[in-house]
Amino acid sequence: MATITNKKALENIGLSEKEARALLCLFEKGSITVSDMARTLNIPRTTVAVILDNLKRRGYADKVKVRGHFEWEAVEISAITEEASARFHNFEKEIPYLKELVKTQDLSHGFSVRSYTTRAGLIKAYNLILELHRKDRIFYIEGRASVEAKLLFSDKLLVGWQEAIKRTGIVMEALSSEKIFDHVWNTKNRQFWEAHLGKQLIVYMLSDEIMNFPCDICAFGQTVMLFIPAKDIAVIIESKELSESLQKLFHGLKTLGRKTTFDAEVHKKIEETELRGNPLN
């Protein structure tokens, strides 16, 4: 990953030497705990906590919850780059890296957006679903082209994620393409598909014309998530109103679909394949 190295430029926009080092650490690490930053910078933990609070007050950093604990990420990086580029011409070479490393921006009034533009960030965003509790319900709109893109990920990653979903015990309702299995069935073997069986997934199959788009959209609680796996993009929006609206849209669209379960669809495809005399390996 590219890193930001121009500490002097950050000092020139009003940061102390230690604050600049801390912000550079956030740029490089993406997200980090107070303790890990203290070890990385060789600064006492109490001092790091004060520095991060100062960066937060300036609007440059914020805390985010990651798997039950808090980490710190850079915030409003685009604003920093705009200010820096106007005041320091020699800082221009760093601007693309800053923009690439945008993590979180607080849009006020309880509405916040976090974006990721790398494969690691995309996976991190998907893994937020694993933090839900047993019997929590997630509403998932899955584009056909998105499914095709996800199947290009490693089998180890895909199977591992499905096993983790099953362990959480969460309930998923999904809108998907009626023809999705026809498009992707022969791309994987039987062992791969059977690894996906057993999770609580209710599916409403809609026409391929409606579902032929390249992203996943899901809503749960006060969270809305947008994934574009072909481009390694994930956007996480915390908004109660938006989540409620998307869930209402989901319930309206599902009335247009054929209700089934993921398990039923997989078993049906296995039977159809075997009847044609071409069983999956």
Image (tube, rainbow, N blue to C red):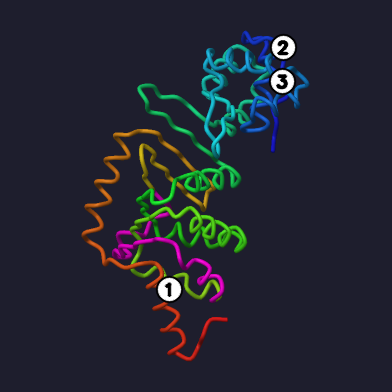
- Front-most of 133 and 109? 133
Q: Quadrant of residue 206?
A: bottom left
The residue singled out by tag 3 in the image is 6
Type of amino acid under label 3: Asn
Residue at 58% x, 26% y is: 74
Q: Which residues are magenta?
A: 190-217
Within 10 Å of the Cα at label 3, are there few (<14), some (14-19), or many (20+) other Cα atoms? Answer: some
Q: Which mark is residue 138?
A: none
Is residue 189 shown in magenta? no
- Image quadrant in which the N terminus is located: top right
Q: Quadrant of residue 31?
A: top right
Report whether residue 39 is seen.
yes
Report whether residue 93 is seen.
no
Within 10 Å of the Cα at label 1, are there few (<14), some (14-19), or many (20+) other Cα atoms? Answer: some
Mark 3, secondary structure of its residue = loop
In the image, which is nearer the foreground, mark 1 or mark 3? 1
- Front-most of 101 and 280? 280
Distance (Cα) linking label 3 and label 2: 12 Å
Mark 1, secondary structure of its residue = helix
The residue singled out by tag 1 in the image is 266
Q: Is residue 15 above or below residue 235?
A: above
**Cβ atoms at labels 2 and 1 below 8 Å apart:** no
Q: Is residue 183 above or below residue 89?
A: below
Q: Is residue 83 above or below residue 162?
A: above
Type of amino acid under label 2: Glu
Dot 3 or dot 2, earlier in sequence:
3
Residue 108 spot, x, y in % from top left? 39, 22
The residue singled out by tag 2 in the image is 17
